[in-house]
């Protein structure tokens, strides 16, 4: 699996580095600020905010700034009119705060409905794309740690998970490689590793593969700008897991999200459709069980606001 993971990473780097120079955009200024000369050389606002739909973006926020975000997923639209096409059900909600320690480093905390996950995270921008194309891509590192305090119902299959506090932790790590190809088009690749301290002892009866603690994945995300304030955004993750291939007892589908991004003053709003109810990598990468082809997709929104402290 490690060979596959690093091969895909190498391919992603190759794709993103093959292009010409590009121009600066005029969106919200959330990026690095070192000296005026250095800032002028950098490509700004590859994306408008810290997330696309499910995927992280390359962006950070300025030092001493605070970003508040709300992520919401309703129920499946396949529920029909009696469930008001999913609006009657909230499949997941996450509240998050991200703080700019420096212009390159942010730390954050959040709380999700699914598994009552409390997560802490950090993102550090390692490299910034330049207009002269001497630095053709931006690169950032993202890590999070999730903790679930939930109490499993008696006689549930999850009951034995919580016998030790360590069982409640999971982690995700990403290398985010992004390029702004033009003022209207940005794209990124996200090699990802998820580790869960505890997984159930399960076997895929189709191929004999066992569930694993470590999952490697590769994500792709992009933004196409239509007007000054409206863009089309999308992200997709492929998870390398034989256990999840054609598993009849544990159905799994690759997380896919498509949405519209709207900037309204200091807010950035995403209206989206996705088959994933999870809102952190620790949830949606191991356990997306709904399929777009079956109509099991959820209307959702992401909204964020920056406060300059």
Image (cartoon, rainbow, N blue to C red):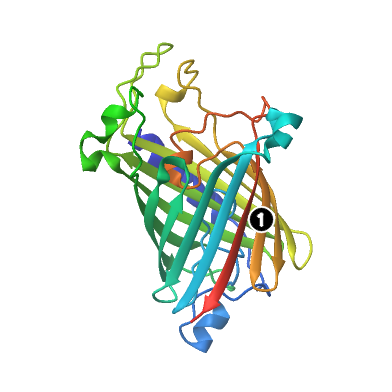
Give coordinates of residue 36: x percent, y percent: 52, 88
Name the residue at 66% across, 55% down.
270
Give coordinates of residue 103: x percent, y percent: 44, 76
Left or right: where 24 falls relative to 7:
right
- Label 1 crowding class (10 Å Cα cut-off): few <14, some 14-19, many 20+? many
Name the residue at 36% across, 19% down.
209
Give coordinates of residue 106: x percent, y percent: 41, 68
Q: Nearer the viewer, residue 276 or 55?
A: 276
Give coordinates of residue 215: x percent, y percent: 37, 36
Look at mark 1 in the image and give the residue it sits on: 270
Q: Is residue 202 above or below residue 280?
A: above
Q: Nearer the viewer, residue 284 or 126?
A: 284
Name the residue at 67% across, 26% down.
293
Quarter of the image where one finds residue 86: top right
Left or right: where 156 falls relative to 225:
left
Q: Quick check: can you spot residue 143?
A: no
Q: Quick check: can you spot residue 148?
A: yes
Q: Secondary structure at mark 1?
A: strand
The residue positioned farthest toward the top in the image shown: 205
The residue positioned farthest toward the right in the image shown: 227
Q: Is residue 55 above or below residue 114?
A: below
- Quadrant assignment for the N terminus: top left
The residue positioned farthest toward the left in the image shown: 164
Q: Is residue 64 above or below residue 294?
A: below
């Amino acid at each position: 699996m490690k060979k596959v993971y690093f091969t895909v990473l190498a391919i992603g780097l190759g794709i993103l580095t093959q292009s010409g120079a590009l121009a600066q955009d005029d969106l919200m200024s959330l990026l690095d600020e070192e000296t005026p000369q250095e800032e002028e050389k950098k490509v700004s606002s590859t994306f408008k905010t810290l997330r696309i739909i499910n995927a992280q973006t390359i962006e950070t926020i300025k030092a001493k700034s605070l970003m508040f975000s709300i992520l919401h997923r309703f129920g499946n639209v396949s529920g029909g009119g009696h469930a008001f096409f999913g609006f009657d059900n909230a499949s997941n909600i996450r509240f998050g705060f991200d703080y700019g320690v420096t212009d390159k480093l942010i730390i954050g905390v959040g709380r999700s409905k699914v598994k009552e996950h409390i997560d802490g995270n950090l993102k550090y921008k390692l490299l910034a794309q330049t207009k002269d194309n001497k630095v053709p891509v931006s690169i950032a590192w993202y890590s999070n740690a999730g903790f679930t305090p939930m109490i499993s119902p008696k006689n549930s299959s999850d009951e034995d998970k919580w016998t030790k506090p360590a069982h409640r932790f999971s982690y995700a790590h990403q290398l985010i490689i992004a390029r702004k190809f033009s003022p209207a088009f940005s794209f990124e690749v996200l090699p990802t590793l998820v580790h869960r301290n505890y997984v159930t002892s399960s076997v895929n009866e189709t191929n004999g593969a066992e569930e694993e603690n470590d999952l490697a994945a590769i994500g792709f995300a992009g933004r196409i700008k239509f007007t000054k304030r409206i863009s089309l955004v999308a992200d997709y993750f492929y998870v390398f897991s034989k256990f999840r291939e054609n598993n009849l007892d544990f159905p799994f589908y690759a997380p896919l999200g498509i949405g519209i991004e709207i900037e309204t003053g200091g807010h950035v709003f995403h209206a989206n459709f996705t088959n994933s109810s999870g809102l952190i990598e620790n949830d949606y990468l191991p356990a997306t069980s709904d399929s777009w082809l079956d109509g099991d997709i959820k209307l959702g929104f992401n909204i964020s606001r920056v406060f300059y402290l």
